[in-house]
Image (cartoon, rainbow, N blue to C red):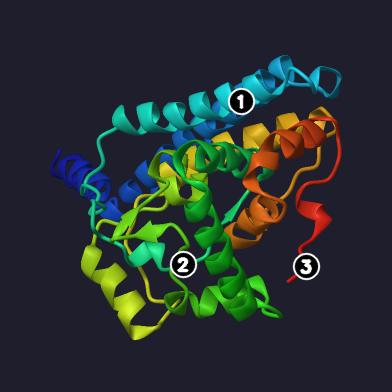
Amino acid sequence: MASRQKTRQKKSRKRKAIPNAAIKNKHASNTLSQHESVALRTAEKRRKDFVERLSIDTARSGIQPLYELMQESYSLFDSMLDDITLDPPLACKRGCIYCCINQVSLTEPEALYLGFHLLETRSPSELQNLKDRTQTLLTELKGKSREEIGMERHLHPCLFMEGETCSIYTARPFVCRGWNSVNAEMCKHSNQSGDALAPIENHPLPRIIADSIQIGLLNGAKETSLETGYLLLPRAVYLLLENGVENITELTENWLKGEAFFARGISI
């Protein structure tokens, strides 16, 4: 009898000895799997929406559907983010500019939507000023790889950071929407120290959501035989302004016909 009790005690102790790390790893794995599932569903839905609304055969009437699709895509990100509770909470808030001293990339649909936003919100003189500043920034970046630009990102504020706020907040690219931090001091240290590799604690889910929507749109564009890719924001802005932002309609029509937008290159 005593022997059986000892055996049960040993088994009991063995069950209690399961490492906490194993439980945490399993929970983390399950959470990651859930996030990946959400990302796949979101990307597929965006792809289908793009294909249903836009094709090379509807180039003349495709501008409004593209504009609306981008508005819906940005709203989708906002609503999905509003539906989740992040712990710890995000440290990102108005006036925190450390991530904005950076050069991000965007896709053709994002760039064209931004072009319409600029056309709607800026005067001719403001657009000329933006073009001049874009030329100056591109001259500074000329000949540098994305990796090199990334390593010295603290030296190059975003073109649209004005008065310590984002002047294109409602039209900002997905990478800006997805990036986040839970510790503003870590962002400040990375920026002020010039250490582009300094760790910044953040939540992966907002980035996963932003990436999935962006990828879904790109997959839809690719399926309809449109040019797809990524370009640094200042280079995309220069392409938009090179011949006057009033030509954004023509740029959009041509891209929807299958012509190049990003691949046209810039003269700087």
Residue, disc 3: 267
Task: Identify the secondary structure beneath mark 2.
Answer: loop
Please tell me which residue is depicted at 29% across the width and 61% down the height of the picture: 163
Task: Identify the secondary structure beneath mark 3.
Answer: loop
Residue type marked 1: Arg
Discs 3, 1 touching: Cβ within 8 Å: no
Residues under labels 3 and 1: Cα distance?
34 Å
The mark lying in front, picked from 3 and 1, is: 3
Quadrant location, the N terminus: top left
Please tell me which residue is depicted at 26% across the width and 53% down the height of the picture: 92
Q: Which mark is residue 102?
A: 2
Residues under labels 2 and 1: Cα distance?
28 Å
Residue type marked 3: Ser
Q: Residue 46 carries which label?
A: 1
- Within 10 Å of the Cα at label 3, are there few (<14), some (14-19), or many (20+) other Cα atoms? few
Residue 24, image x, y percentages: 32, 49
Residue 258, image x, y percentages: 86, 35
Task: Identify the secondary structure beneath mark 1.
Answer: helix
Q: Quadrant of residue 98?
A: bottom left
Closest to the observer: 226 or 80?
226
The mark lying in front, picked from 2 and 1, is: 2
Discs 2, 1 touching: Cβ within 8 Å: no
